[in-house]
Image (tube, rainbow, N blue to C red):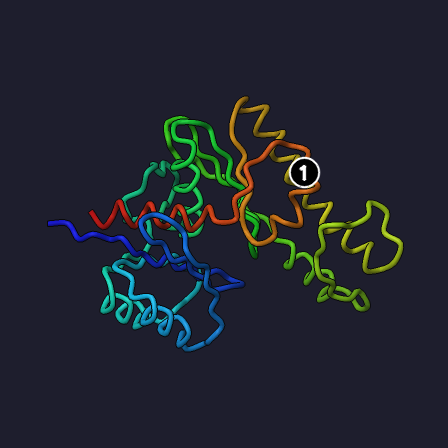
Amino acid sequence: MLQNHNTVLCIDFGNSRKKAAFFTQGRLQEILYFIAEDFGDLKLAVERLQPNGIILSSVINHPPDLEVWLAAHAQFHLLNHHSKLPFTTPVGKPETIGADRLALCAGAVLSHPHQNNLVIGLGSAVTYNFINTQNAFLGGGISPGLTMRMKALNSHTAKLPFVDAEWNVPLVGYDTKTNIQSGVVLGLAYEIDGFVEAYRLKYKAFNVHLTGGDARYLAPHLKNLIFADTDLLFKGLYAIFQTNAQ
């Protein structure tokens, strides 16, 4: 008899942040962020929420005993290339595909099945992920994210400071800070628009999904029609868990 997984904790360990989403009856109820190096805050959250199921997407080297602990508290699934997915991965070395990219693709296929979908994830790195009408993930591209670009300017020059990204940046910067913000934020926006146009020449009609923590900085500057959903990765994780739990 199948267990009723009406409460699921979807955990995402990214390069910059560790976070999770708590679902009840398929509805996202709460977003959590974790900072403790020993994952004590995550364990407290699990004990408080008492989920029936837990899925983990990780692109970092987390301790293996954490998986054991999670599995002792709920039905547990580690997202990897062996997971049952709502799409195929006809690419070389599927075991090298980041778990976060698998979750993003699942979210796009869930919302727009059997359509061409380009998912742009804006995290530590920018990922371009293309799924075709046969629900096949063909691959895409990876480039540095906003913060990585800011840090590169600071660490590889003698005098340029590190500045934070903002959404309301001028085209023509009037001081060092706004020059950097213009170059990085608008530069990445133009990169994204350029990729979308290149994909359009090749594939004609497709949906563009924008997600990730930096989407709020880029979305106002993009000229192409997009679906902006900051929770797309978590929705994909939830769907993958339900598929693998059965």
In the image, 165 versus 146, the foreground residue is: 165
Residue 152 vertical placement versus 187 (above, below): below
The location of residue 15, given as percent across then percent down, is 51, 62
Nearer to the camera, 83 or 141: 83
**Whole-percent x, y for residue 99 in the image:** 40, 52
How many numbered discs? 1
Percent x, y of residue 123: 55, 54
Q: Amino acid at mark 1?
A: Leu
Which residue shows up at 61% across the image and 29% down it?
198
Badge 1, how many Cα within 10 Å: few under 14, some, many 20+? some
Element assignment for label 1: loop
Taking the spot 82% from the left edge, 48% from the top edge, the residue there is 170
Left or right for 114, reference 54: right
Q: Which residue has dot 1 on it?
A: 222
Residue 226 image offset from top left, x and y in percent:
58, 35
Looking at the image, residue 40 lies above or below residue 25:
below
Residue at 51% of width from left, 27% of height from top? 206
Which residue shows up at 39% across the image and 60% down it?
11
* Depth check, front residue: 18 or 96: 18
Q: Residue furthest right?
A: 174
Front-most of residues 20 and 189: 20
